[in-house]
Image: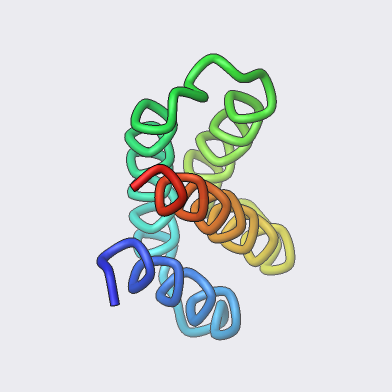
């Protein structure tokens, strides 16, 4: 498995066990998701697409407010990040 696939799995596991995570762990996962999504967007050439920027903004806000978000919103943010990463990975794999 690739490191991206491993990270996607980690995000899904975290979303399924949200009650076991600290606010720091949630922020760390979301921040790493943001960095990874930005990098993959650059690689695919979709860096300027509006929807990709929207997802990044939502993840940044979720990361900054992780302490105040209800568990279901944190879960949704982690799943959104995993979904975007999965889509970007598919695009990158097709281009190889």
Most foreground residue, 48 or 77: 48
Residue at image location 60% in from the left, 30% down from the top: 52
Most foreground residue, 96 or 48: 96
Q: Is residue 42 above or below residue 95?
A: above
Task: State the image coordinates of residue 15 (x, y, percent, origin top left).
Answer: 58, 74
Residue at image location 55% in from the left, 41% down from the top: 59
In the rendered image, which quarter contains the N terminus?
bottom left
Q: How is the image coloured?
A: rainbow
Most foreground residue, 63 or 36: 36
Task: State the image coordinates of residue 12 (x, y, percent, origin top left).
Answer: 53, 75
Q: Residue 76: which quarter of the image?
A: bottom right
Q: With 78 as the anchor, is 54 left or right in this view?
A: right
Q: Residue 50: which quarter of the image?
A: top right
Q: Is residue 58 above or below residue 16?
A: above
Task: State the image coordinates of residue 5 (x, y, percent, origin top left).
Answer: 38, 69
Most foreground residue, 14 or 94: 94
Q: With 45 as the anchor, is 69 left or right in this view?
A: right
Q: With 90 as the anchor, is 54 left or right in this view?
A: right
Residue at image location 35% in from the left, 59% down from the top: 24
Q: Is residue 86 above or below residue 62?
A: below
- For this orientation, the residue located farthest to the top is 48
């Amino acid at each position: 498995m690739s490191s991206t696939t491993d990270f996607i799995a980690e995000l899904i596991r975290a979303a399924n066990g949200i009650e076991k995570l600290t606010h720091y762990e949630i922020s760390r996962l979301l921040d790493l998701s943001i960095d990874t999504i930005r990098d993959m967007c650059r690689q695919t050439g979709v860096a300027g697409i509006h929807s990709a920027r929207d997802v990044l903004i939502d993840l940044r806000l979720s990361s900054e407010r992780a302490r105040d978000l209800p568990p279901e919103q944190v879960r949704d943010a982690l799943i959104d990040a995993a979904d975007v990463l999965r889509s970007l990975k598919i695009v990158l794999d097709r281009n190889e």
